[in-house]
């Protein structure tokens, strides 16, 4: 592996170390202008479904089940996952997310799924 897959909140400034920045949210982050986000790609299809996102509602008690349900959704998005993996083989990819909780969010799960097969 040349680059790797990192995760980062979208609100801190982009840095050179981020490499390709991919927004992995279904909705555009609140209060952020597109120019400031410095996003290379927006892959809504790898974000949790609206139904799953609403059910989870960042309730830490639901975290184990959220991970299971989200992994099941990701199993149906192989083309987008393969695209991210291809990019990671040529350089760093940063999955950018909006959640405040840096340990219990969809980007954490997505990073783990992607790293499993690289």
Image (cartoon, helix red, strand yellow):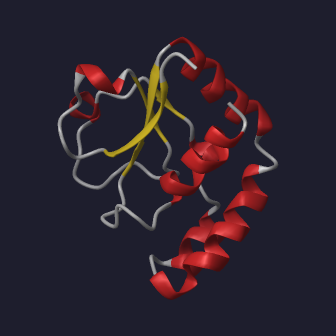
Name the residue at 48% across, 50% down: 25
Q: Residue furthest front?
A: 1
Along the line of sight, the residue nearer the viewer: 88 or 13: 88
Along the horizontal axis of the image, is 93 left or right of 110? left
Q: Residue furthest top?
A: 90
Name the residue at 46% across, 83% down: 59
Along the line of sight, the residue nearer the viewer: 97 or 94: 94
Q: Position of residue 14 (x, y in %)?
A: 23, 30
Q: Residue furthest right?
A: 76
Quarter residue 118 falls in? top right
* Labels in figure, total: 0
Quarter residue 23 falls in? top left
| 100 relative to 10, above or below | below
Along the line of sight, the residue nearer the viewer: 5 or 42: 5
Name the residue at 35% across, 54% down: 98
Name the residue at 49% across, 52% down: 107
* Quadrant in which the N terminus appears: top right
| 87 relative to 93, above or below | above
Q: Position of residue 90 (x, y in %)?
A: 54, 11
Q: Position of residue 44 (x, y in %)?
A: 57, 43
Q: Residue furthest left?
A: 13
| 63 relative to 105, above or below | below
Along the horizontal axis of the image, is 20 left or right of 65? left
Q: Position of residue 89 (x, y in %)?
A: 59, 17
């Amino acid at each position: 592996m040349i680059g790797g897959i990192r995760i980062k909140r979208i609100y801190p400034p982009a840095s050179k170390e981020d490499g390709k920045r991919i927004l992995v949210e279904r909705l555009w982050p609140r209060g952020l202008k597109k120019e400031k986000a410095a996003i290379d790609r927006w892959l809504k299809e790898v974000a949790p479904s609206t139904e799953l996102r609403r059910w989870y509602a960042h309730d830490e008690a639901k975290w184990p089940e959220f991970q299971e349900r989200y992994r099941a959704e990701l199993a149906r998005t192989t083309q987008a996952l393969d695209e991210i993996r291809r990019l990671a083989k040529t350089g760093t990819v940063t999955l950018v997310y909006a959640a405040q909780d840096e340990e219990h969010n969809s980007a954490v799960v997505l990073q783990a799924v992607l790293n499993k097969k690289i």
